[in-house]
Amino acid sequence: MPLKRILVVDDDASILRLLATILRREHYDVDTACGGEDALAKIERTQYKVIVLDLMMPEVSGFDVLRVVETRFPQVKCVVILSAGSTLEIASTTRPHGFVALRKPFDITALISAVLGCIDAIGDPPALQPLGAAASIAPTWTPHQSPGQAGPGCPRSCGVARPAPH
């Protein structure tokens, strides 16, 4: 079975590396983007099944990326990551069947389930529902960054490199 290609987008290099590592351990083919501008360039060149996307990024935000994906790449599903205190209404920003929302801090199992749910739903007409708080024994991940604050080394040079093929 071919690998499912996923793009992970975050302006914080440590979060970007963590999410990419988690998804690679689940045998996904993962690319990374250090912010919205980098993500848009990669989306233009590469076909992705799922995009894991932080919404709160400086310059080109996750909302900007969602609008482009909705308009030009409607087959791509998104897992959007919201800050813990966010009261944002994302349903008005994009199509409700095209994303799953996770609120920080989220359970690693919830991330994996959200990505799997997006991949399983590709081509299926039923709408995806945002995931609730998943009860699990997996560790919980909490970022050490204020909402909207640029992460270390991003978006210009995040230092996240794709590992060499084995």
Image (cartoon, grey):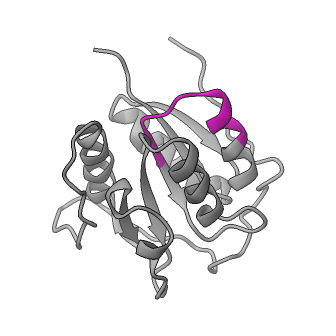
| Residue farthest along the top direction in this orientation | 166
Query: Which image quadrant: the N terminus?
Result: top left
Q: In the image, residue 112 lies at what x, y percent?
A: 30, 48
> Which residue shows up at 59% across the image and 25% down it?
163
Which quadrant holds residue 28?
top left
> Which residue shows up at 74% across the image and 61% down it?
60
Residue 88 is left or right of residue 31, and the answer is left
Q: In the image, residue 58 lies at what x, y percent?
A: 75, 68
In front here: 3 or 22?
Answer: 3
Compared with 1, 116 (above or below) is below
> Which residue shows up at 47% across the image and 64% down it?
94
Res. 104 visible in picture: no
In front here: 4 or 98?
Answer: 98
Q: In the image, residue 153 lies at what x, y percent?
A: 79, 55
Residue 52 is left or right of residue 113, and the answer is right
Q: In the image, residue 150 lies at what x, y percent?
A: 74, 68
In front here: 162 or 56?
Answer: 56
Res. 80 visible in picture: yes
Compared with 144, 107 (above or below) is above
Stretch of the chain drawn in magenta: 41-51
Q: Is residue 44 magenta?
A: yes
Residue 41 is left or right of residue 51, and the answer is right
How many labels were placed on the picture? 0
Q: Is residue 91 magenta?
A: no
Compared with 142, 123 (above or below) is above
| Residue farthest along the right direction in this orientation | 156
Which quadrant holds residue 127?
bottom left
> Which residue shows up at 31% across the image and 62% down it?
139
